[in-house]
């Protein structure tokens, strides 16, 4: 039997603002670029999907020091890579059976358009229930908040996981503009939420086929844990 290349579905936001405000947000670029780089090194095939398809705007704060690192700069300097973010596919254009893993990136935009997207929920449920890998980094876990399994239970219920902490929202000074407290919301759905003792350090949690990272600095480690999980499946 020939080993097929693993296929990863990256999920990015279409939201360019905090709700109806003039406060810009979008994709946190390094959370995509770090993971993409890791998966590329392993020869994986990668596709980018967004809730509405089309353009995924970039979070301005992710393009400044210290977040704007080598991989993010290389991505922005590459027209072919940037065009991937201008032409993302829609969930209804995705056959979930084609993918071994899904990876939800962050940036505050996802708080608005990830939680209630039925297409993303369908893809996530299908991958999860056949033992594929569900992963998220930072605010990406907002995409898992309302996903239910075939039995009607929340996917995150009873699972160990992490994601951007409320303390980190406060330290990033956006606690007044975010639409909800994601850490509290995931706990309400029965998740066993974990976080690092210090904010903004790389921290990941693996619970079976659920792999989550806490913040932008966790993207590379999260991707490496996804690779490890896929090598066991």
Image (cartoon, helix red, strand yellow):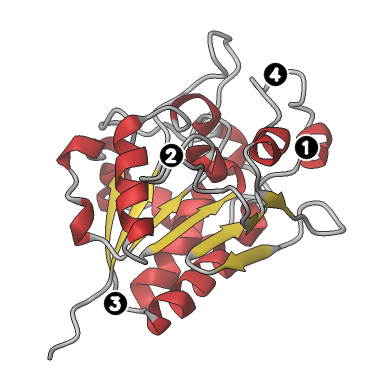
Which residue: 43% across, 39% down?
152
**Dot label at residue 166:** 1
Q: Is residue 210 left or right of residue 5?
A: right
Vertical arrangement, residue 213 with respect to residue 189, above or below = below
Residue at 28% x, 36% y: name it: 86
10 Å neighbourhood of mark 4: few (<14), some, or many (≥20)? few
Q: Quadrant of the C terminus?
A: bottom left
Disc 2 to disc 4, C-alpha distance = 32 Å
Measuring from the top left, give residue 162's x and y in whole percent.
67, 53
Q: Nearer the viewer, mark 2 or mark 4?
A: 2
> Which disc is residue 177 wearing?
4
The image shows residue 231, relative to residue 120, as above or below, that is: below
**Residue 44 visible at all:** yes
Q: Earlier in the sequence, mark 4 or mark 3?
A: 3
Q: CA distance from mark 2 to mark 1?
A: 28 Å
Labelled disc at residue 152: 2
Q: Nearer the viewer, residue 57 or 70?
A: 57
């Amino acid at each position: 039997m020939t080993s097929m290349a693993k296929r990863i579905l990256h999920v990015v936001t279409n939201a360019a603002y905090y709700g109806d405000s003039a406060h810009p947000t979008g994709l946190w670029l390094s959370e995509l670029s770090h993971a993409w780089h890791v998966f590329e090194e392993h020869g994986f095939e990668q596709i980018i999907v967004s809730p509405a398809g089309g353009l995924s705007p970039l979070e301005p704060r992710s393009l400044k020091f210290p977040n704007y690192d080598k991989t993010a700069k290389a991505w922005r300097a590459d027209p072919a890579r940037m065009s991937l973010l201008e032409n993302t596919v829609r969930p209804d254009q995705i056959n979930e059976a084609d993918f071994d893993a899904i990876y939800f990136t962050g940036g505050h935009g996802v708080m608005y358009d990830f939680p209630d997207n039925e297409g993303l929920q369908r893809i996530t449920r299908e991958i999860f229930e056949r033992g594929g890998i569900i992963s998220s980094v930072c605010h990406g876990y907002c995409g898992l908040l309302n996903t239910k399994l075939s039995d009607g239970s929340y996917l995150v219920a009873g699972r160990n996981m992490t994601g951007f902490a409320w303390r980190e929202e406060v330290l990033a000074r956006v606690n007044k503009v975010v639409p909800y407290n994601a850490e509290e919301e995931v706990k309400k759905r029965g998740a066993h939420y974990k976080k690092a003792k210090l904010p903004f350090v790389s921290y990941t949690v693996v619970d079976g086929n659920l792999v989550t990272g806490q913040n932008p600095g966790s993207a590379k480690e999260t991707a490496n844990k996804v690779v490890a999980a896929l090598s066991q499946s």
